[in-house]
Image (tube, rainbow, N blue to C red):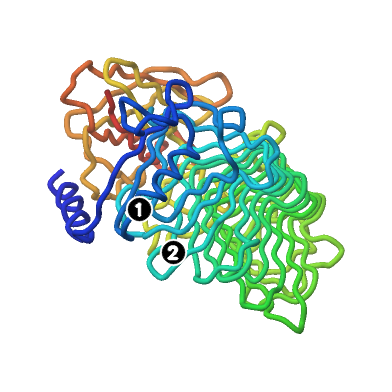
């Protein structure tokens, strides 16, 4: 706690002393645009709020946070499109977990967002859903001081184009970071080009008709922990007038004509791409490589199986493939594995692309300096990294639990056996101890529990529960748990699972 408070104090101390923050309130149901925009007398429309802020802004240090109650904002309400969030404007839902919905009524552009200062307080557009427009969100211009824009928990639905970071010619580079959002039922998801950095983290793309993500001459586009399904191409990159690079990591790509499309040309800057710890399955082709690309491009530590083909008729084209699970002898590379007759995924037809314990992709890679204590997915007491996007965990449960409720966890072990030893400490020391059963990551102290619950017949899956006391002093604690489960692959017959951290909340 001391460290956290110190970090907060340090970050606040580093802000310019001239920052001036004001809140403007919007309520689509109870507000009125003749009101002053206060908490007790909010505006009705976002158009009025952003116009008020534009007129009130005196210096570049004037920051405004729009706090909007849940509601639908459309032309019938009085919204005028596009709604423009300038560089000194952020948006926050007035109710935690709620959504601010903008219904574009097929307007050409529903929302424009400019760059913001990366060190300013209360950054980002949060909890916004934009739907039914030709373009959902258009990225506006940046400046030397306002060059980043955060979209947090935002979604775009039923638009021709979800996010447009290509149409405007920017005077300055801009960095767009979109996290924990969705792009649903759009013709195209994200379009980007030019001097931009685009980061897409923990994003879901579903039912795009054409390309989920397309870019040309982009400085850097990163897709991390994405779920991308349906359409022509998940990532389509082409050569441009400047060097471009795309990185796809820890993402699942399925249901496309080609998962990754690369179209380069010899007379321009050829694109460079890296696909790392990705899962590509259920596509007509995992990759379509048409034209020249940077020879340092690589696919590694990935799983591309159960596609109609690893590559389309254009072939591998010299692409490096390393340490990956493939099901085609036509793929050339180093450290490749070919799966056996057993299914690689738990239930691919149902959209569950977690690896089965029997998959050769489990624990196939050694630990690294960045990941010195990897998960022991096959329970042989020797930890290793899995190929593909989803790491197999043998102890599964929620990330949060409420006081006064019952915490339910699932443990994966052998198809037979009844002993599951559960370590339930309040805290983890951060130390890792090697034992005959693998890595012990927690300090059990006096908190050993044994769950005498038989696994479901033939599955090796057992559930157990523990009551969380209705004690306010527990709120904010992080419980770190680990299980000792039967395993015929372990020399002693038992192996430790992964650790699981659970935050206790009110």
Quarter occupied by residue 474: top left
Give left or right: position of 463 versus 347: left
Answer yes or no: is residue 408 visible.
yes
Circle 2 packing at 10 Å, graded few (<14), some (14-19), many (20+), is many
Which residue is disc 1 drawn over?
57
Marks 1/2: CA–CA distance: 19 Å
Quarter occupied by residue 445: top left
The local secondary structure at tag 1 comes to: loop
**445 or 160: nearer the eye?**
160
Q: Where is residue 70 shown, x and y percent of the image?
A: 46, 26
Image vertical order of residue 289 relative to residue 397, above or below: below
Give left or right: position of 425 versus 75: left
Identity of the residue drawn at 20% across and 50% down: 8
Q: Residue furthest bottom?
A: 267
- Disc assigned to residue 280: none
Q: Quadrant of the N terminus?
A: top left
Which residue is disc 2 drawn over?
147
Q: Quadrant of the C terminus?
A: top left
Q: Where is residue 16 shown, x and y percent of the image?
A: 22, 61
Q: Are marks 1 and 2 in contact (CB under 8 Å)?
A: no
Image vertical order of residue 308 relative to residue 273, above or below: above
Circle 1 packing at 10 Å, graded few (<14), some (14-19), many (20+), is few
Identity of the residue drawn at 70% across and 45% down: 134
**421 or 40: nearer the eye?**
40
Q: Where is residue 116 shown, x and y percent of the image?
A: 41, 58
Answer yes or no: is residue 358 visible.
no
Identity of the residue drawn at 53% across and 71% down: 171
The local secondary structure at tag 2 comes to: loop
Give left or right: position of 22 versus 175: left
Identity of the residue drawn at 81% across and 55% down: 309
């Amino acid at each position: 706690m001391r460290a956290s408070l110190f970090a907060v104090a340090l970050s606040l101390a580093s802000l310019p002393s001239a920052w001036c923050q004001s809140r403007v309130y919007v309520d689509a149901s109870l507000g009125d645009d003749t009101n002053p925009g206060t908490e007790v007398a909010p505006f009705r429309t976002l158009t009025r709020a952003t116009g008020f802020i534009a007129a009130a802004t005196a210096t570049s240090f004037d920051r405004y946070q729009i706090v909007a109650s849940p509601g639908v904002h459309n032309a019938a309400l009085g919204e005028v499109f596009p709604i423009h969030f300038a560089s000194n404007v952020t948006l926050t839902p007035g109710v935690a977990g709620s959504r601010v919905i903008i219904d574009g009524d097929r307007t050409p552009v529903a929302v424009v967002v400019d760059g913001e200062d990366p060190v300013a307080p209360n950054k980002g557009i949060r909890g916004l859903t934009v739907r039914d427009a030709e373009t959902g969100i258009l990225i506006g211009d940046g400046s030397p001081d306002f060059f980043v824009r955060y979209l947090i928990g935002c979604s775009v639905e039923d638009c021709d184009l979800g996010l447009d970071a290509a149409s405007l010619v920017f005077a300055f580079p801009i960095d767009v970071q979109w996290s924990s959002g969705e792009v649903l039922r759009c013709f195209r998801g994200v379009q980007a080009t030019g001097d931009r950095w685009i980061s897409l983290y923990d994003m879901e793309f579903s039912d795009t008709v054409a390309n989920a993500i397309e870019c040309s001459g982009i400085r850097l586009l990163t897709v991390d922990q994405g779920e991308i399904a349906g359409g022509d191409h998940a990532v389509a990159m082409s050569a441009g007038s400047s060097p471009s690079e795309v990185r796809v990591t820890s993402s699942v790509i399925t249901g496309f004509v080609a998962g990754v499309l690369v179209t380069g040309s010899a007379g321009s800057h050829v694109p460079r791409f890296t696909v790392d710890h990705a899962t590509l399955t259920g596509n007509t082709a995992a990759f379509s490589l048409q034209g020249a690309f940077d020879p340092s491009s690589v696919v590694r530590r990935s799983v591309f199986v159960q596609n109609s083909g690893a590559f389309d008729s254009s072939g591998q084209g010299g692409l490096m493939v390393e340490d990956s699970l493939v099901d085609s002898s036509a793929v050339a590379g180093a450290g490749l594995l070919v799966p056996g007759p057993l299914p690689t995924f738990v239930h691919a037809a149902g959209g569950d692309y977690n690896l089965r314990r029997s998959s050769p992709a489990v624990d196939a890679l050694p630990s690294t300096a960045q990941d010195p204590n990897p998960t022991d997915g096959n329970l042989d007491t020797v930890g290793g990294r899995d190929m593909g996007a989803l790491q197999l965990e043998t102890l599964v449960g929620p990330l949060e639990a409420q006081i006064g409720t019952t915490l339910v966890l699932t443990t994966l072990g052998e198809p037979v056996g009844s002993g599951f030893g559960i370590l339930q400490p309040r805290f983890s020391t951060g130390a890792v101890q090697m034992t005959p059963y693998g890595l012990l990551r927690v300090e059990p102290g006096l908190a050993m529990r044994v769950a005498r619950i038989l696994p479901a017949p033939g599955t090796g899956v057992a559930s157990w529960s523990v009551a969380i006391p209705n004690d306010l002093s527990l709120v904010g604690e992080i419980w770190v748990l680990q299980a000792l489960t039967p395993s015929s692959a372990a020399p002693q017959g038992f192996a430790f699972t992964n650790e699981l951290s659970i935050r206790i909340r009110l």
